[in-house]
Image (cartoon, grey):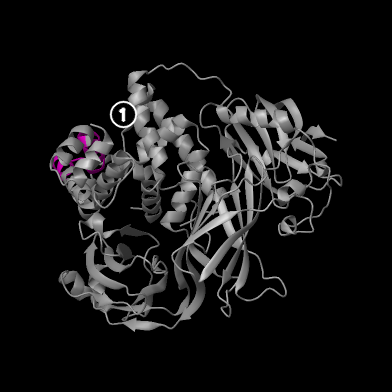
Amino acid sequence: MDDREIIALFYERSEQAIAELSKKYGDLCFKIADNILNDARDAEECVNDAYLGVWNSIPPQNPDPLRTYLCRIVRNLALKKLRTNTALKRGSQFEVSLSELENCIPSNTFDEHLSTKELTEQINAFLSTLRRDDRVMFLKRYWFSESLSEIADAFGITEHNASVRLSRIRKKLHQYLKCKEVSL
Amino acid sequence: MDYRADALSSAIGNIDTAYLEEALDFEVKANRTRRTIRFPKLSAACLILLLIFGFSATAFAISRIPLSWRDIFSPNQTVIGDADEAPIVSEQRTDVETLKIDVVKTISDERVLYLLYSVKANDGAVLNSEGRFASFDLYFPDKMMSGVYQQYFLPRKAGVPENELEGVIYADWQTYANAKDLVMTFSNWQEERLFDDVKVDFKVAEMVENPSGEETPLPYGGISICNAHWEDGVLQLMMKGPSAVDDWSTGQNWYFIDTRTDTVIYPEQRADYHTPEELGQDAGDDCLYFWNYVSVDKEDLPYLEMHWGGKSVFTTVLAGEWEVTINETPVTVQSELLAENVLLSYSGEELLAEKIECSKLSMAVYFADYVDSTTGILGALKIFDANGEAIPCDWGFTADQADDSCMLWARFREPIEPESICRVTFNGEAIFTR
């Protein structure tokens, strides 16, 4: 079913909307939540919470594209759950990928600190400098928290190659932020 | 967890929807055609640039240096060229009438946009030139704006009323041909204000033990502490404030004092934000929830005294949202071709610079193949004037979105006449002279 039609169902307050949302994006949402939480039951719960969030927000919202709107809600909910449950952190791909980013931001050498929004703008700008493949790889790893093997499979390369390419991208990010005098 | 990585992760979480869609679509395409046919090297963007160049690879004849950023907008200054004097027609939308923002002039080439605008408050009001808008955005509707942009105010000129200011914006422009339909949004005018130090009546240990207790109001902005939670050496404070107030967003406005030792404990720089709907609450509630974090041992909590203020803070003095759209097509200055097919040697590799071009605002070196910009190559390029002095500029790198082509490019810190560029060197060797 087309996203517009799904949104129309939400506007009609038809429960079929959630069924259609789940049918179309359920697997994607579960994958995002599971990559972060590393726990199928919690991931499932998180996805259901996300559906509820969409139900509560449409209307009045009319998101376009619906897919990324839903993905953001799932990710936010999964991270929230992760934050409050230390046990979940063990084995989470998100935690692994996050640890890779720790050295990306230059150390605290400036008085002025960027807000998250400003940092997002810088990262958007940085992403615009990357080749499409590198940008997608960056997102797969650090937004979707995909494992190296999943990324390698998607790009048709070895895990080692994926790891090296990600390492280069992180190095570029570090250089970029340093150049822009970004610190936290 | 390293708070810097956490902040970076939060920032990544908010990245542009277009990039997310691109990543999601990539999977579909990758699964469908794992080995796709390679696109031609020449991207659409480069093709457009070449077409533009084909029509207008002429040098500018006007020479008035030195120039300053303000000079290029002066009515008496001809460096922009007569054609650039065409009026900028802009439309303003606002939810308040207390501030009027007009675009005065723009100048841009294929890589850089530079824009002068005026801000005028009601008669009798005073706008501090060191003030700022709490948020500023520059974008084309329905387009992904690549590059970065910056906005600042010029010192007030003599004789200009105190309710008026001139603001400047520059943006890494990249593939946009002109500024038509460009939208600028501004919100909440802020000025710096000193707040007295106030002790907050807040017993953090009690709230941690009894999380469902009453909210504790903070002294400013309608903000209150809703909840407190301690875990793994970190105190999490959940706060709530009106969404229109944006100067409480970081932990810089408050701190704890350990009353046993008078040690000041500041919150961490990171903070997480959620709208009510994200938390499953009434979407009509016009507020934001945010979490602040303080590294502190649990046994210290009963001895913590919360303080707010004691420093200068940018505070909203004029709340509102303003949006300005450029309706007409301002003239875009064209670049001059300096050299073509220049072979460069760097780190044992040979790189072919397809063309080197410049305008009054920037210079670019185009490559058909991808160049790793992290190897220090940006520092290898230098631009010199007739006196052998290096022309101040900031080098950057932009990869094409569709293929391996890329450019190394520099924004001049002051606009120049292309004729003033007499030598360009790469690793000390001249690659262009005149």
In the image, B393 versus A150, the foreground residue is B393
Percent x, y of residue B304 = 29, 77
Percent x, y of residue B33 = 37, 18
Residue labelled with disc 1: A150
Q: To which quarter of the image does residue B34 belong?
A: top left
Is-magenta flag for residue A59?
A: no
Q: In the visual, does B391 lie left or right of B244? A: right
- Above or below A27: residue B161: below
Total labels drawn = 1
Percent x, y of residue B235 = 27, 65
- Dot 1: element: helix
Q: Which residues are magenta?
A: A26-45
In the image, B74 versus B215, the foreground residue is B74
Residue B81 seen from this side = no
Q: What residue do we see at 65% from left, 65% from top? A: B154
Tell me the chief SS of the magenta region: helix
In the image, B203 versus B340, the foreground residue is B340
- Considering the image in quadrants, where does the N terminus of chain A appear? top left
